[in-house]
Structures are given as C-alpha cells and as structure tokens.
Image: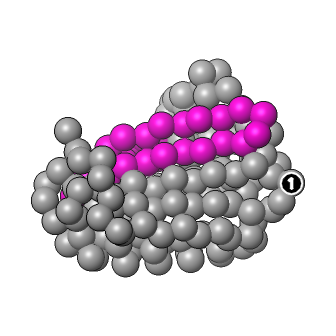
Amino acid sequence: MASSRFEGREVHLTIPVAPEMEIVATAVVSALGEWMKMQHDKIDEVKLAVVEACINAFEHSGTPDHKVEFSFRVAGNGTDTESCLEVGVSDAGHGFDPGTRVEPQIATKLKSPKKRGWGIKIIETLMDDVRIESGANGTTIVMKKYR
C-alpha cells in the first residue's frame, strides 16, 4: 500500500480551455517524474493520460468558467517503489454518470465512421489507478502511477 503522506511535492495549476494548454500540464508531470527518478516510459504514460483527460474536459465538460484545475502530488518519499505520482484533473462542467459509460469495442470502432471515444479507456490502460467522480458541479479524474 502506498503511503498517503505527501512530502511537500505538490503543485496546483489552472489552465484555460484553449488549444495546446495541455502541454503546460505535461511539463509539470515531466518535472515531478524526473525528481522522482520515474522511468521515462512511465513519465510518458502519465503525460499521455493527462493529455487525454484535458481533451475530455475541453470537449465534453461544458465548464462555464472555461478552466481546468490540476493537482499533482508525489506520495511517499518519491524514490521508493511505493511512491506514486497522483494527478487530479477537475472541471466545473455539467458532469456525467461514469456508470453509464460504454466501453469502446475495437471491432465496432474500426467499422464506424466515428473513431473517437477512447479517452477514458486510454487513461485506465496507462495509469495504475483511476478514480472518476462526476456530478452536477463537475468532474474530477484522479490518476496514479507508481514509481
């Protein structure tokens, strides 16, 4: 079980819903991942998951303030195998019921003119732990990647 204490390695970031702004969030992932001495392929997986979460918030949330909030935390001491990088991505949009989400099926998607709808599946595949909380006041995705 990972330690729940945070050793002062926490960053909060707010970005506008605007093209290319997800790159700002991936820079924080890179910096914290390097500090943790996380393998580069794992850092890249977290960065891709963050990009996917941003795209979902940008395109689907309907957030009235046109902002996405991030929290980045290093749990544990940052250098042992139990340490993890936790990323929270939140919007103030209309939310959705995660329980009604339909898992994309590759055979169906390949035949369909609409190839999209893979974001959450990609996030779940890349990260070690994913929790989605959503309701009338917005959506938060909390993702963890262990060192």
Q: Is residue 17 left or right of residue 37?
A: right
Label 1 sits on a secondary structure element that is: loop
Q: Is residue 139 left or right of residue 49?
A: right
Magenta includes 13? no
Q: Residue 117 occupies which quadrant of the picture?
A: top right
Mark 1 crowdedness (10 Å alpha carbons): few <14, some 14-19, many ≥20: few
Measuring from the top left, give residue 17's x and y in whole percent: 75, 66
Please report the residue visible at 43 percent of the width from the left and 48 percent of the height from the top.
143
Pick the front one: 59 or 83 = 83
Residue 91, above or below 103: below
Which residue corresponds to mark 1?
A: 64
Extent of the magenta region: 121-147
Measuring from the top left, give residue 55's x and y in whole percent: 64, 57
Measuring from the top left, give residue 96's x and y in whole percent: 71, 32
Please report the residue visible at 56 percent of the width from the left and 77 percent of the height from the top.
24
Pick the front one: 116 or 100 = 100
Pick the front one: 65 or 24 = 65
Task: Residue lying at the far top in this picture: please name it.
Answer: 100
Magenta includes 144? yes
Amino acid under label 1?
Pro
